[in-house]
Image (cartoon, coloured by chain):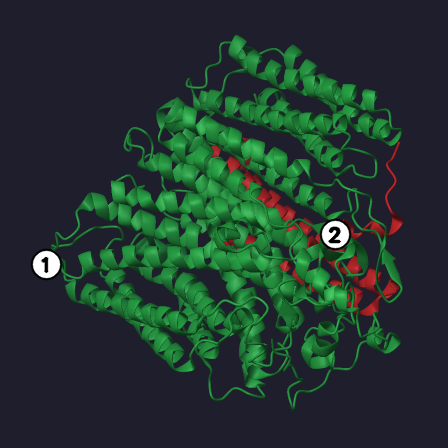
Chain colours: A green, B red
Amino acid sequence: MSDNAQPPATATPQAPPVGALLTPKLPNPSPRPQEEEGALLRAWWRPSGWRLVTVVDNASIGLLYIATAFLFFLLAGVLALLMRTQLAAPDSHLIGHALYNQLFTMHGTVMMFLFAVPAVEAIAVLLLPNMLGARDLPFPRLSAYAYWAYAVGGLVFFCSIFFGLAPDGGWFMYPPLTGSQYSPAMNADLWLLGIGFIEISAIAGAIELAVGILRTRAPGMSLDKMPIFAWVMLVFCGMVIIAFPAVIVATALLELERAFDMPFFITQRGGDPLLWQHLFWFFGHPEVYIIFLPAAGMVSMMVPAMTGVPLVGYRWVVMAVVGTGFLSFGLWVHHMFATGIPALSLSFASAASMAVSVPTAIQVFAWIATIAAALRLRPLKTPMLFILGFFFIFVLGGLTGVMVAVIPFDLQAHDSYFVVAHLHYVLFGGMVFPLFAAFYFWTPLVSRRALSERLGRWAFWLMFVGFNVTFFPMHFTGLAGMPRRVYTYAESQGWGLLNMVSTVGAYLIAAGVLVFIWDLARNFRPAIGRNAGNVWNAGTLEWLPSEIYGVRSIPRVTSREPLWDQPGLARDVAAGRYFLPSAPSGTRSTLVTSAVDAQPDYVLPLPGPGWLPLLAALGTAGFFLLLTFKMHALAAACGVLAVASLWRWLWDADTGPDYAPVDIGAGERVPMMCSGAASHYGWAMTLLVIVCASIFGSLCFAYLFLWTTAPGAWPDVAELAGVGRPVLSACLLLGGSALVARCGHWLHEKQHGLFRAGMVTGAVLLGVASGLELHGHWAHGLRPQASAYAAAVYAVSGLQAFFALIAMTMGAFTVARSVAGRLSYTRRACYHATMMMWHYTVAQGLLGLGLMHAFPRLVG
Amino acid sequence: MKLPLTPRLTSPFGRDLLLLIAGPLIWMVHFLGIYIVNALACARPDSAFAMQAGGLPVSSWVIIAASVAAWMAMAAAARHAARRSRRENAPDGARFRAWLTGALCVLSALAVVWQTVPVFLVAACG
């Protein structure tokens, strides 16, 4: 463990904040009692041997997560090498067209879904708690669940290529090519079900990270003092929560079409393949920024540390990050310039594409200005080399991005190798180079030794030269007319030399990656708590001395680079002189602070190692994957395992004794645990409700889009079902919601019998309302296969029934806890979460009824 | 009956957050709105949106009106944030949030300008 953090010798000191002047005294006296650290070590013990799979702490899960994401990077890289070998010479027959289709589909899918997004989430799981001064994220078991679901599901998904079952419709899986008519085999189903649930894992991770960033920051770390990486990850989480539901809905609709012949994308029955493109790219374009922004955030953390000066234009960068997060949602149509959308609509997307370059440029200029103000830069270290390589490559990718945002140019370059070059310059340059910089920069935090500078330079130059040799010629290959996704070409087309050069470059990249792996093998020695220390003399909190329990005490922060601006901070933190230097009640815990100004709110007890997240993840992965192979009984068994594990996992949550308030230091006594909307789980439920609303919003869009493009498939007003049933359904929904709200009063009054009766009656009303609606359509003679209209109606009603089932299951769980004596007014988290889900479900149901019954009458 | 909460845990974050991202939120609503209006005008050539008025289709006038409304709403949000920062008792954090609100409004207003200009240059359904 190292404690060599010092302010840079010639750095301009910032004026001490007011808070620091007012509170010169440290929160806790020292020396600390000897047994205090022992209690911390006992609470945070880490299992060893085969029980290591039960770990839940962020450091262990973060490392596993990064290792798995890197494995997928290597696997997808091997697929790329196979493709490049095939394309090295014209008329090559090394790989047939069928396997080639699987290779490019899997390369894109694995890189985007199994490497890029998980890798940045993994880095955040590992680093964020340390950066924020927390001991762990607020829901450690959720992190473990998200990781195992991703790792198991991802590996099984990848193995499909060895059996010829890998998806082959391209990474964006456009119908009608991927519909059952043209892709009758199960390859497409594997993509739809496999990727769909990996998205769920990503959303779980995003909710965890967002609550962690907002509620577990060190005291004093107000929004204006938050590290840029935390800002970036907050925006990342918001984007995942809004964007990913669109692709979940898209995959669900295509799977419904393939499995049950519901014609969402079949033109002859009122469907429209463009619906897929809208939904996919509403996710797919923000996805680019979901990958890029965290990488840019890492750069914003590394550049100050490597230069010895705070980031120039901090607030401009925050503005740029938030602005990019929003503007990126306006770009989805720029992937659809060649689809016949009205010219003015295309211009809106083109304008948004121009607008998003403004905040991106602000970030680039902030980095350049910081480097220009550097106090220490030479000799250039490996992380800085990768960062400079990122600048060069990403800026070039950004410039070609502006080119393809110009509609006439895009129509020429569409689906050519020019686009392949552009997207790799943006994604490889914008994400992989910063990621390698991050590997070199943060390895000393989790390893006894830093990585080698000499090998790092070799890795960088091989990758940098290899990348440009591979992808720069592709601009010309594309302009010469070579389309993407062709498995071979004729010699007479004249693309042979350019392709050969690209293939040589690809092997150079591979050589660079191999050098990095060799460096890892020689120098990476995982060590949580006995790391190489702050070798870069960085200023942010992750470089505080830490142990298996995280920081010895949670610091009070008065600047953005506390290790530079608060002399002796590392020493005082390690000596336990700051907040919460103990393990209250012998449990793992961390401090929860207010979202805006980071004032201590309460102490949150955290769970330790356990099997349940792993079992729940295995069940979830098994359910989705076995469903693909039509093994329905086994899939059902896995589903039961997942639900049972989740039930058991949550059964123990929010129970136990009512702990006494904890003295965290500085005379602050805060409660241990909290119930209600302002608690950490209340925030998580709010985010979950936003995810649900986003799913519903995407489905509403699908319904309205189909109405816009195929009005002929919509029935006349006279043909619609009567309004009696929907009105009755609405009344039942409202009645159930009112009853569940009333249950809160009965819980407060300790009238447990009334509470249980109210919850059960509410569940019955909710279930009947959903059933009534579905039965009404069926009784009226509407069949989901008949038309896109009918399919859309059943999709909206079916989603409502699914949410009703979730709310009813949560209600049953709440009643079961009440019966078992595990629910009280002071321990009401379970009821509160159920109530939030319930009210949301009712609101969604009412809107759905309006969409299906009032809308056609209004426009008819 | 309203369930009581510990007073210090009642966070104004939701309100603060909404104000902070008011500019981009307005931009997003504007973007979706104008996209839908233009799509409807082109998909339903017989509708009121597709009628010509003053050399432009009605849908384009709706888009221009929406842009003006968006600029006004962004200006109001920025002004409100600036006023609040002067009122509040936490100068550093409040000033930072007010600046962020204003800067995001400016960026979003610029995006709205760029999205409005094509109305005068490009045929609505060409």
Q: Which mark is residue B114?
A: none
Answer with left or right where residue A792 lies relative to residue A71. right
Q: Chain of mark 1?
A: A
- Give the camera-side residue of A274 and A797: A797
Dot 1 crowding, Cα within 10 Å, few <14, some 14–19, many 20+ = few
Q: CA distance from mark 2 to mark 1?
A: 69 Å
- Give the camera-side residue of B76 and B58: B76
Residue depicted at x 86% and y 74%: A23
Q: Which mark is residue A604?
A: 2
Residue B22 at x, y percent in the picture: 70, 53
Where is A368 relative to A28, above or below?
below
Amino acid under disc 1: Ser
Q: Residue furthest bottom?
A: A10
Between disc 2 and disc 1, whose residue precedes?
Answer: 1
Residue depicted at x 65% and y 50%: B25
* Mark 1, residue position: A492
Considering the numbered disc 1 on the image, is that residue within a helix, a strand or a loop?
Answer: helix
Q: Chain of mark 2?
A: A
Residue A841 at x, y percent in the picture: 66, 29
